[in-house]
Image: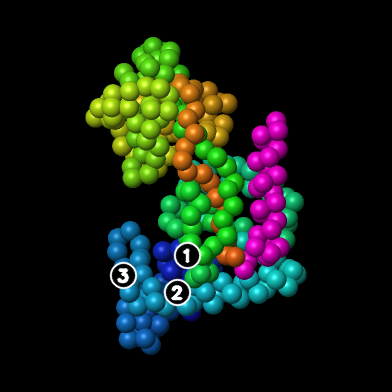
């Protein structure tokens, strides 16, 4: 059951095997035994990994909750190592959380943190994660949500591209190729409207764009001179400091924010309280500086 729960959570027999210190074939053998016991296929195997079959999703809703409740029960005892599973939108995970996480771990040596960078909405009731750091308006049903960070969209590009195209003002950006994020990402039309420019002109310019599937990829594409990307402020500090990217227009507030989300009954868990206090203090300290 533990092999199944890990494979269901990670979507990978190999990842489950690494946690349990066995081979991927051993995980496959254990899953096969469960499938014979239940008389139903639990996973669909494919070239890119495994996904839960209908019977597997039903079982995972139970096993995930059971292991999650067990982990939380141990955490409530306050002794020994505490495991904290965090799901975060990828750009926040890679550009804000992970670069600072060492500070948190240094202050809380008894907490083991596992970070999953994913756009999927975390299934908290199933016990797959303890804390989710989500992008949205905070309207998440059945959970406790606190706003962590406001976001603003700012156009960025490589210094060489800005010089070559003579991008001196925000209005000049209508001449630049765009890097767009699909299906999620800031809207060029919304940014243009907020900047007092013609949204339709920027939408038409969208025909001259590179499409990527995440903001991290958009920043890399922009740094390589493929176009101008709309990035989330304040998550571009390292690129700006290194001069791989430069700001090419004003930062326009976004409708969505980053939220700290957990189950209502888990707010008092020591590890969750510690992560929340540290994050809010870190963000408040940055604003003060």
Horizontal arrangement in the rendering, residue 218 relative to residue 204 (left or right): right
Quick check: 240 above or below 18? Answer: above
Query: What SS does tag 2 mark?
Result: helix
CB within 8 Å, label 1 to label 2: yes
Residue 278 is covered by the magenta coloring: yes
Magenta extent: 265-289
Q: Quadrant of residue 44?
A: bottom left
Main structural element of the magenta stretch: helix, strand or loop?
helix
Binning the other alpha carbons within 10 Å of mark 1 as few (below 14), some (14 to 19) or many (20 upward) gives: some
Query: What SS does tag 1 mark?
Result: loop
Q: Which residue is mark 1?
A: 123
Residue at 73% of width from left, 55% of height from top? Answer: 108
In the picture, the disc for residue 44 is 3
Horizontal arrangement in the rendering, residue 58 relative to residue 246 (left or right): left
Label 1 – label 2 distance at C-alpha: 9 Å
Quick check: 125 above or below 120? Answer: below
Residue at 65% of width from left, 47% of height from top? Answer: 279
Query: What SS does tag 3 mark?
Result: strand
Q: Earlier in the sequence, mark 3 or mark 2?
A: 3
Q: Which residue is mark 2?
A: 61
Q: Earlier in the sequence, mark 3 or mark 1?
A: 3
- Residue 70 image offset from top left, x and y in percent: 61, 76
Residue 267 is covered by the magenta coloring: yes
CB within 8 Å, label 3 to label 1: no
Label 3 – label 2 distance at C-alpha: 17 Å
């Amino acid at each position: 059951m533990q092999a199944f729960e890990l494979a269901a959570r990670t979507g990978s027999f190999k990842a489950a095997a690494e946690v349990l210190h066995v081979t991927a074939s051993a995980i496959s053998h254990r899953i096969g035994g469960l499938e014979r016991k239940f008389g139903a296929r639990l996973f669909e195997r494919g070239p890119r990994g495994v996904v839960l079959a209908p019977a597997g999703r039903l079982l995972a809703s139970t096993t995930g909750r059971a292991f999650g409740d067990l982990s939380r029960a141990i955490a409530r005892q306050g002794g020994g190592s505490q495991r904290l599973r965090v799901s975060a939108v990828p750009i926040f995970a890679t550009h804000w959380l992970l670069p600072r996480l060492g500070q948190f771990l240094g202050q809380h040596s008894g907490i083991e943190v596992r970070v999953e960078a994913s756009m999927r909405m975390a299934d908290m009731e199933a016990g797959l994660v303890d804390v989710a750091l989500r992008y949205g308006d905070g309207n998440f049903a059945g959970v406790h949500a606190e706003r962590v960070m406001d976001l603003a969209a700012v156009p960025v590009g490589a210094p060489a591209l800005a010089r070559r195209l003579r991008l001196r003002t925000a209005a000049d950006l209508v001449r630049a190729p765009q890097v767009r994020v699909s299906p999620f990402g800031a809207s060029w039309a919304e940014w243009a409207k907020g900047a007092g420019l013609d949204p339709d002109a920027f939408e038409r310019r969208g025909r001259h764009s590179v499409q990527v599937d995440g903001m991290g990829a958009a920043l890399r594409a922009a740094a390589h001179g493929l176009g101008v990307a709309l990035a989330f402020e304040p998550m571009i500090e390292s690129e700006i400091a290194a001069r791989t990217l430069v700001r090419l227009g004003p930062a326009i507030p976004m409708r969505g924010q980053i939220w700290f989300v957990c189950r209502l009954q888990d707010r008092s868990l020591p590890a969750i309280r510690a992560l929340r206090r540290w994050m809010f203090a870190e963000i408040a300290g940055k604003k003060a500086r």
